[in-house]
Image (cartoon, helix red, strand yellow):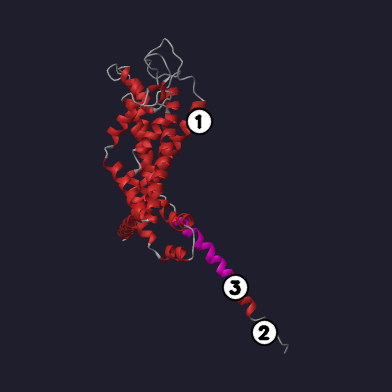
Amino acid sequence: MTNLPPDAGSAPADATHTILTRQQRSTKAPSALRQMLPTMTPWLAIGLVLLIGIALFGLIGPLFVGDPAAIRNIGLTPPSAEFPLGTTQTGQDVLAQLAIATRGSLEIGLIVGLLATVISAFFGILGAYIGGFADEAFSLISNVFLVIPGLPLVIVISGFVPAEARGLWTIAIVLAITSWAGSARVLRAQTLSIRNRDYVAASRVAGERAWRVIVVEILPNLLPVLASQFVFAVIAAILGEAGLSFLGLGASNSSTLGTMLFYAQNGFALSLGASWWFLPPGLLIALFGMGLSLVNFSIDEIINPKLKTVRLHARRERRAKREARRKERRR
């Protein structure tokens, strides 16, 4: 017999073990990624379709429509082949105005969502991690903004801003300042819970800097909460801007869905029966809010796994009932 090296018999086993280990890693990696993403459901699909459709209309639509400010001598014309959504009292194309106004509302929503999320993360996460006087001071500021009624404060601040200086960024900053406190309280509670966990304590004992502990150890666990709060801030911003514009306190140098409703009201569109003037902007606001809400419900399943468990349990029950019905039919 020929003498084999001592490792010859174990080489295939080692190779098989290596292949299995790689396969296990490749299967585990997507599962960890899927935990950070909402499960695709019919409601999430409907929400994404609404959001993507409205976003594309606001981004690409203005490139394919005419001048929204062009005045014609065909005021309050019903929808036709030339003007699919009719015209306003001064003969302006409603479809062109709707495309430009959708882009303006999306811009305000994104700006306010980002600003409110950043401010709430600063006061909520940083204060809770540092603790002590900083946490008490940040909590006091959050409580002050939380107890002040949001809409009256926005109306008062917008009323004191001159009309010529009331631009898109001014309205966005006003809305962001008045809409971050509630999210900061939620982030503070979540950060206080995460701060006492073992891996965060180990990082602090190892001498890691505070900013690295927050960014690497704490922030990834708060991403679903931040995403949910961002979506909610966008909804509140679009509705808040529409309310301000409807009252005549919106951005004076930009076109939004709220300004369309404001001009439709001043043009007596409702009393004149020109439903094609005020229904499209109102419907777009409702559909966009509906889409964001459906996406937010799916994000809530990541924050609260019990919701996902209840939905999966209900789905299993429906499947069991279907199987029972099929068996009864076969009998």
Q: Residue furthest front?
A: 133
Where in the figure is residue 195, as x and y percent of width and height? 39, 60
Q: Is residue 132 above or below residue 275?
A: below
The numbered mark, 1 or 3, whose residue comes first in the sequence reads: 3
- CA–CA distance between discs 2 and 1? 69 Å
Callout 1 amino acid: Ile
Dots 3, 2 in contact, CB < 8 A: no
Callout 2 amino acid: Pro
Is 133 magenta? The answer is no
Q: Say which mark, if any, is on residue 163.
A: none
Where in the figure is residue 301, as x and y percent of width and height? 36, 53
Does residue 201 appear left or right of residue 318 in this picture? Answer: right
Where in the figure is residue 176, as x and y percent of width and height? 38, 38
Q: Quickly name the residue at label 1.
A: 60
Q: Quickly name the residue at label 2.
A: 6
How busy is the neighbourhood of tag 2: few (under 14 within 10 Å), some, or many (20 plus)? few
Q: Quickly name the residue at label 3.
A: 16
